[in-house]
Image (cartoon, rainbow, N blue to C red):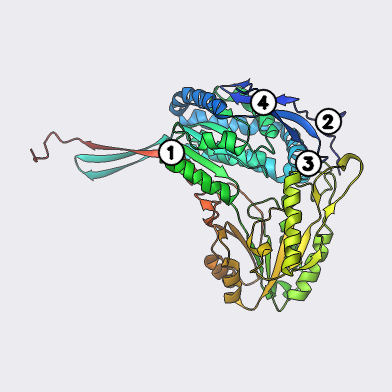
Amino acid sequence: MTRYAAPGTQGAIVSYESRYDHWIGGAFVPPARGRYFENPSPVDGRPFTEVARGTAEDVERALDAAHAAAPAWGRTPAAERAGVLLRIADRMEARLEELAVAESWENGKPVRETLAADLPLAVDHFRYFAGALRAQEGSLAELDEDTVAYHFREPLGVVAQIIPWNFPLLMAAWKLAPALAAGNAVVLKPAEQTPASIHLWMSTVADLLPPGVVNIVNGFGEEAGKPLASSARVAKVAFTGETATGRLILEYAAETIKPVTLELGGKSPNIFFDDVWAADDDFRDKALEGFAMFALNQGEVCTAPSRALVQRGCYADLLDAAVARTEAIVQGHPLDTATMIGAQVSREQLERVLSYVEIGRKEGARLVTGGERAEYTGEMAGGYYMRPTVFEGDNRMRIFQEEIFGPVLAVTSFTDFDDAMATANDTPYGLGAGVWTRDMATAYRAGRALQAGRVWTNSYHTYPAHAAFGGYKQSGIGRETHKMMLEHYQQTKNLLVSYSPKKLGFF
């Protein structure tokens, strides 16, 4: 196992700057109002850099730069744009370890996850959309021997992207890769909790992009996000975050009738049928890992399987084994590759998670394990650590219905297939779901019956390119991580051409 040194300390493989301005037009630009805010690491709660606090004036400067760059980038041949994305992927891969350590330090997640999942997936998304762009074709239809309808895909122009703090670099890749491939210029606002790692990434690839094609404005939602999302100079808004903020984004976009992509909250069911327990084998072991996946990334995942529904025949045995698996999760320093769960992203988020533990207790849910903050001394003193927590209760409880965004699992039982589907779908969300069974007919029926945009079957928490990701109901609009996203960042131009010399004959 490896223990990485904190960025900027002796022996570290990566360092952050002491200050980050906005990135506008290919250069760092100080904030118009001269204000900055501190960025603490969740590992120890201490600030490690300060970041420009953006306002509407900074958004306008970024939009100026994006509009200046968009026409030329949009006219750049597809093969050249694809080549740029491939070079970005190569550069990221060459510095993958550095970026992984930097992101773990800023976000608090275990470096084993950033090394094995976040950064490799981000790299692959740039490569995937480079290939998807090269394979994209327009179309023509011969309406009759003298009339042809041509269809061309054209970039929207300048798009706004607002990303969350739970996967800072992967969420940036999910949005930037298709937008850039489609020929758009971007103004991106990172979450105020994790603005620095995207700047570190930008410094890694900046020379590969024409100035102004990607611009980054830091700041808070009301001060920077709102003027960006509501600007009439933006052709589209893509947002990942909580559902309440998604509603605001829709309101802002409606003012100027612009399209949106929203990936919002979730309260995903993870369903275990009795036959999971039919044999003590690799499949049972895999299912127990699937149960414990609620703690991946400290539970700070929109699709976290935060509701476990277990059929009554195997309920007691499965729960006992699954709780033991949960209690075996190694919590520790996020930069240690042995660590399985790190720190919540902020003090506010930790307090939110702890408040839901109290809500669960007051509702009468039974606390099975966890339920408390993990306190450490030394390098981790002051960090935001939460023990993986499991409750037993009823699906009507708030801990079953509301997104907690922390390592808190609510478990209940079901009788039969119909009961499982009714309970699983009894939520305003519909982002993800999991189904565990040895019977593939049951798996298929469940997958079709569940009201969720992605249903993992005998697996959970895999996010490959070329598998569409997005939500039903209040979990969002649109899909990501699939070639269809190219069209989300394009508009269709139809040329309806008559080659006949004859008039129509109306006048």
Callout 3: SS: loop
Note whether 200 is above or below 298 in the view shown.
Answer: above
Q: Amino acid at mark 4?
A: Arg
Residue that carries the numbered disc 2 in the rendered image: 12
Question: Residue 188 appears at what percent x and percent y?
Answer: 57, 33
Q: CA distance from mark 2 to mark 1?
A: 42 Å
Chain-order first, disc 2 or disc 1: 2
Report if the CB atoms under discs 4 and 3 are less than 8 Å apart.
no
Question: Residue at image x 91%, y 44%?
Answer: 377
Q: CA distance from mark 2 to mark 3?
A: 18 Å
Mark number for residue 35? 4
Question: Which of the two marks, 2 or 3, is nearer to us in this view?
Answer: 3
Question: Which of the two marks, 4 or 1, is nearer to us in this view?
Answer: 4
Note whether 501 is above or below 302 in the view shown.
Answer: above
Chain-order first, disc 2 or disc 3: 2
Q: CA distance from mark 3 to mark 1?
A: 38 Å
Mark number for residue 42? 3
Report if the CB atoms under discs 4 and 2 are less than 8 Å apart.
no
Residue 85 in sight in this render: yes
Residue that carries the numbered disc 1 in the rendered image: 490
Report if the CB atoms under discs 3 and 1 are less than 8 Å apart.
no
Question: Residue at image x 61%, y 25%?
Answer: 23
Question: Residue 491 appears at what percent x and percent y?
Answer: 40, 39
Report if the CB atoms under discs 4 and 1 are less than 8 Å apart.
no
Q: Amino acid at mark 2?
A: Ala
Q: CA distance from mark 4 to mark 1?
A: 36 Å
Q: Amino acid at mark 1?
A: Gln
Question: Residue 411 appears at what percent x and percent y?
Answer: 71, 68
Q: Quadrant of the N terminus?
A: top right
Callout 4: SS: loop
Image-quadrant location for residue 155: top left
137 on left or right of 171: left
